[in-house]
Amino acid sequence: MASSRVAARRAPLAGIVSPLASWFGDAAAVRRFRRERLGRRGALLRPRDAGWRGVVPGFAECVEMIRGGVPFQVAAERRYDRSGKLQALARALRTGGTVYLPQIHQVLPRLMRLIAAFRRLGLGPAAEECSFLFLVEGTGRPGMGLHHDGDLDALWLQFAGRRTVTLGPRVPPGTPEDLDDRLAAGGARAGWRTLDLPPGSLLYLPPRTPHAVVCRGRSLAVTLTWRRTADRAGAGAGRRAAAALARWDVVSGFAEPVPARRPGLLWTQLPVLPGSGREDGGLRVWTADGAGPRLPARARPVVARLAAMPRLPRRLAEACGLGPLIEAGLLAPHDLPRRIRPDDPGALDGWRF
């Protein structure tokens, strides 16, 4: 009888869909990843569905974004061009160099939503939250060579094409980031392995994991990184930690394209966190802008999931008393735009990398 009551309480939440559902089937899968992998061992996750496909624009549209003023850099055989000149873009695409766009989440709201969801998975709040979009017309030419990224947790998302990645055992703290390519010659006996990353795959790399990438055809991918700090998920001082979890780093501009309305569904538009206590028998929520609307106490189980920015049925939201979030625009009957054309491309953080 008790188990039936628990199932009944959980059933209304079944319509909530996490942005991470393409790789994690349920909360138990997230807990296993946090317990067994995070900070310890790498993991390659295959997609469970096609939900990942709409997160970033296609290859040609990403090239158009660069020509519209979004910052980019080029790497080829350990040489870097940070000039931001379009001639460098054309040369890299022609010769198989790696074109990468730092802090690209500032103009890709759905990617920023994934970052918010990964924070709740256990990667935040943390310092130096970064994103990089990689474009390669692959010819088998190495880009950055064998290296590691220091004390960073990294998530690689493959959106189009394939990459071949060689991974080695974690190196000790203080090891120089650029490594001798001959280290990988040790092969499997020395702990090295080579993986193929197909579209939709998610690769997690713990800090100080050596890696090298080769693309033999067109590839579109994103890397997300978080610097390891003493304040991990669940730590930190109250409101400061909440502000870090709710941070929304998308610039102002024009949505391209404007998402279609779907009246029966609601998408979280900003990370929403429940307050730590009750006010007059109800619940106060928080966003990056500070205190949000008051909600009835029965809303807490659903609000507890809104920092990860899921979508949910409107009928569930209304039954749980989330009407004030709909009125405030924090829940809306349309998805986030796939791309923002920024009002001021010159102010994007990527230009400072």
Image (cartoon, helix red, strand yellow):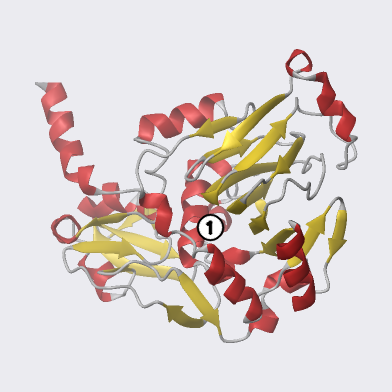
- Furthest toward the top, the residue is 189
Q: Is residue 102 above or below residue 50?
A: below
Residue bearing mark 1: 239
Residue depicted at x 49% and y 41%: 121
Q: Quadrant of residue 220?
A: bottom right
Q: Is residue 17 above or below residue 332?
A: above
Q: In the picture, which quadrant includes the N terminus?
A: top left
Residue 209 x, y percent position in the rendering: 74, 33
Q: Is residue 249 visible?
A: no
Q: Could you tell me which secondary element the residue under label 1 belongs to?
A: helix
Q: In the picture, which quadrant includes the C terminus?
A: bottom right
- The amino acid type found where label 1 is placed reads Arg
Residue 170 x, y percent position in the rendering: 76, 28
- Furthest toward the left, the residue is 1
- Judge by depth and name the residue closer to the eye, 292 or 21: 21
Q: Is residue 159 left or right of residue 185?
A: left
- Judge by depth and name the residue closer to the eye, 80 or 314: 80
Residue depicted at x 27% and y 73%: 260
Residue depicted at x 30% and y 49%: 17
Q: Is residue 152 left or right of residue 60?
A: right
Sort mark 1 into few (<14), some (14-19) or many (20+) by Cα contacts within 10 Å.
few
Residue depicted at x 79% and y 40%: 148
